[in-house]
Amino acid sequence: MAKTEEFGEEIADFVRRVAELKSARSVPADDLGTVLDAAIFELDHVADQLRPLYERLAAEGHLGSGTPDRDEQRLLRAIFQHLPLPVTLVDRESVVRRMNSAATSFTGVRAGYATGRPLTGFLLHADRVAFRSQTAAVARGEGDRSLTVHLQRNPHLPVRATLTALRPGAEPRTAVLVVLQPGTHLAGSHTSPQESFHAPAPDLGEATRHAARMDLADAMTTALLTAPAGDRAAVLERAAKVLHPRFADWVIADEGAARQRRTTVLGPPDAPVGDVLAQAPAACPLVVEAARGGALMLQVRPEDPDSFGRDVSGAPVLVRAQVTSLLCVPLRGRSDGPVEGVLTLFRSGARLAFSMAEAQTVDVMSRHIALAMARHAGPAPG
């Protein structure tokens, strides 16, 4: 193996030197002789050094055709993809390397999106630390592990995650194979384990979703045109009521830029709305960044639980609200105009994450809200 790696390094160095020779074609005519000598030296190196090394490796079997190995790898990949159980391959940092078809259906996440992202991003915040710790232990060779976790898309369904160490091919690092299986259902749940493997088929086409966004924009326009004059807070409150709950589970409105004040918080029934309303906007990094003139921010499965600060109880708002996706947008009538406020939207539980199309709709509505606020009153506070 060491000889094969040495040969590969020699070839890589040779390719780099050839690229340098190609770039030297533009040197003055008087210096072309030096370039030609270097090219002849490289060709001699291939003939005298690399060719004999290749022949020795081939004779020793290090450079065989590899067809049986490739066939075996193709077979294993096919088995991995078609396993009826949700299976994911992660590294010691819980970053997804591969995810089979059953896992994409079970988690509701496309394999192309999941690859390169931590698997913990699809779990509830409370389960992430334990999962990372157990994954690292398995990767260190401390034995297989099993624990119960909860997916953000279905937080009420316990999922049994079984972790086992795996060394793919000749790779130097140990990977971890994660098998996900539905655990015992909570009382009152009517979803069978077999049904939970498959994401529900969407019952609305793209045309219907587009129509819903147009209806939302129309409702927002009507609310803004009928808002009482001279009352900026009333404009924000009306806009929030249009968005909640048909578009977002949580709607948080902050007025002003430099000296912000929270005017409206709408959330699910029995949610800690009062605690979020009492939170200072200056303690919310996302709100502060938006108020400074930042662009609209769309986050799916936010990684940083403190990005929206903590409530009066000291708990991260995103964790307590079980946020799975969010939109945070500055309210500004024109690109170079002042920020009138900040609007933040949360979705939680099994609700689909905000899409790019929905974010664009909110961006348009935010400009209309800002214009209505500026029309009904003087400059924004702060």
Image (cartoon, rainbow, N blue to C red):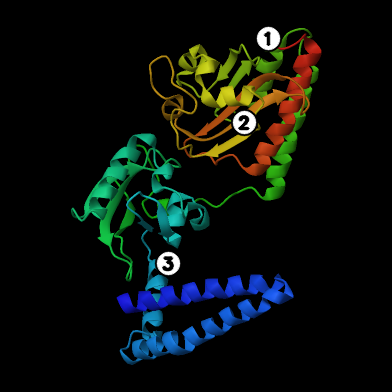
Q: Nearer the viewer, residue 158 or 369?
A: 369
Q: Which residue is mark 2?
A: 246
Which quarter of the figure has residue 54? bottom left
| Residue 340 % position (x, y) | 70, 18
* Badge 2 amino acid: Arg
Q: Classify mark 3: helix, strand or loop.
A: helix
- Which residue is situated farthest in the front direction here? 30
Q: Quadrant of the C terminus?
A: top right
Could you tell me if the residues under marks 2 and 3 are in contact, i.e. CB atoms within 8 Å?
A: no
* Badge 1 amino acid: Pro
Q: Nearer the viewer, residue 110 or 165?
A: 165
| Residue 57 % position (x, y) | 35, 86
Q: Nearer the viewer, residue 227 or 41?
A: 41
Q: Residue at x 45, y 19 (%)?
A: 272
Q: Residue at x 44, y 18 (%)?
A: 311
Q: Is residue 377 left or right of residue 310?
A: right
Q: Classify mark 1: helix, strand or loop.
A: loop
Q: Quadrant of the N terminus?
A: bottom left
User: In the image, which is nearer the foreground, mark 1 or mark 3?
Assistant: 1
93 relative to 54, above or below: above
Mark closest to the chain's N terminus, 2 or 3: 3
Q: Which residue is mark 1?
A: 381
Mark closest to the chain's N terminus, 1 or 3: 3
71 relative to 88, above or below: below
* Badge 3 amino acid: Gln
Mark closest to the chain's N terminus, 2 or 1: 2
The label on residue 81 is 3
